[in-house]
Amino acid sequence: MNTNENPNKKIKHELSDTDREILASYKAITRGIGLVFGNCCEVTLHSIEDPSTSIIAIAHGEITGRAVGSPMTDLALEVLTRSRATNEDVIGPYFSTTKSGKRLRSVTTLIRNRKGELIGFLCVNFDLTAPLINLMDALLPSPTDISYGTTSENYSDNVGDLVHNAFVKALSRISQTTGVSPIEKNRMIVLELQNLGIFNVKGAVETVAGELGVSKFTVYNYLRDLRGRENEQERENG
């Protein structure tokens, strides 16, 4: 978003507690987008409640020199005015230049409450002047990126594939276990899928039963046994 600040920011907009909760839920999204693109991309979360201190969350503010508590920009105020006459929710991409001369490619997404009223903005500002090596460093894994490591992720276009792919991965891991019966391996597979939340997917029980070569009632029995064990452990720990 254009970072040339407008000095006339005296209008305030009263937000409800629910409005503030909605905006607060976007703080994690702000941080997440910043983690994806690294220090080549600034992400700002704005509340319209007080334009003079509109930024309530920011990632990589060093790009524009802004921080939490910084004011709205002139373009943000323009968006605020336009939003009253349009249902437009995404603005951009558009280009702007910071005071330090950085060229930005930006997109602004409007955040509305349950009544459809504008309560804030989420702005993504990509620094086009950042050296390519910085972008590559941001996008490629580094030795410090160990939170989840490098793993394969299956991008399914239907729930059947989702359940099947999860089953195959669980089967691959459990198959390496020795000294247990086939029935116990089935239970272990069901346990792993249960921990992944796979059985929250409609039709997952039937799909897993087919993969295991058992009836869906057998899978339901496994799940009941697992939940019974969990309840027993909770009572013991309680």
Image (cartoon, helix red, strand yellow):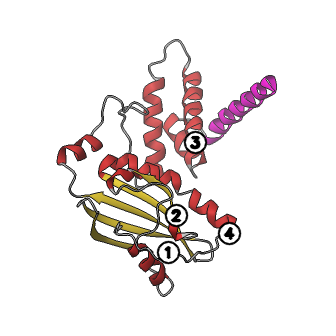
Residue 89 percent across, percent down from the top left? 45, 75
Tell me where residue 172 appears, x and y as whole percent.
42, 28
Magenta span includes 11: no
Q: CA distance from mark 2 to mark 1?
A: 9 Å
Name the quadrant of the N terminus.
Answer: bottom left
Q: Look at the numbered discs 2 and 1 and tell me whether their residues touch, using CB distance below 8 Å.
A: no
Count neighbours of disc 1 (C-alpha within 10 A) and say few if under 14, some if 14 to 19, many if 20 or more. some
Q: Residues within 10 Å of mark 2 (few under 14, many from 20)?
A: some
Residue 26 at x, y percent in the picture = 53, 57
**Residue under numbered circle 4:** 16
Marks 3,1: beta carbons within 8 A? no
The amino acid type found where label 4 is placed reads: Ser
Q: Residue at x 28, y 68 (%)?
A: 96
Closer-to-camera residue (156/238)? 238
Instruction: Identify the residue shown where x is 43% and y is 35%.
Output: 168
Answer left or right for 22 relative to 172.
right
The x and y percentages for residue 54 are 51, 65
Q: Which residue is mark 3?
A: 197
Sequence order check, earlier mark of 2 and 3:
2
Residue type pointed to by label 2: Thr
Tag nearer the camera, 2 or 4:
2
Q: State the extent of the magenta-drawn residues as a range.
A: 216-238
User: Image height check: is 227 above or below 90?
Assistant: above
Q: From what the image shows, is residue 141 above or below residue 61?
A: above
Up the image or down, 4 lies above or below 143; here it is below
Q: Which sits earlier in the primary sequence, circle 3 or circle 4?
A: 4
Residues at marks 3 and 4, CA–CA distance in whole angstroms: 35 Å
Q: Nearer the viewer, mark 3 or mark 4?
A: 4
Mark 1 and mark 4: span between their CA atoms? 20 Å
In this rendering, the label closer to the viewer, 3 or 1: 1
Query: Tag 3, which secondary structure?
Result: loop
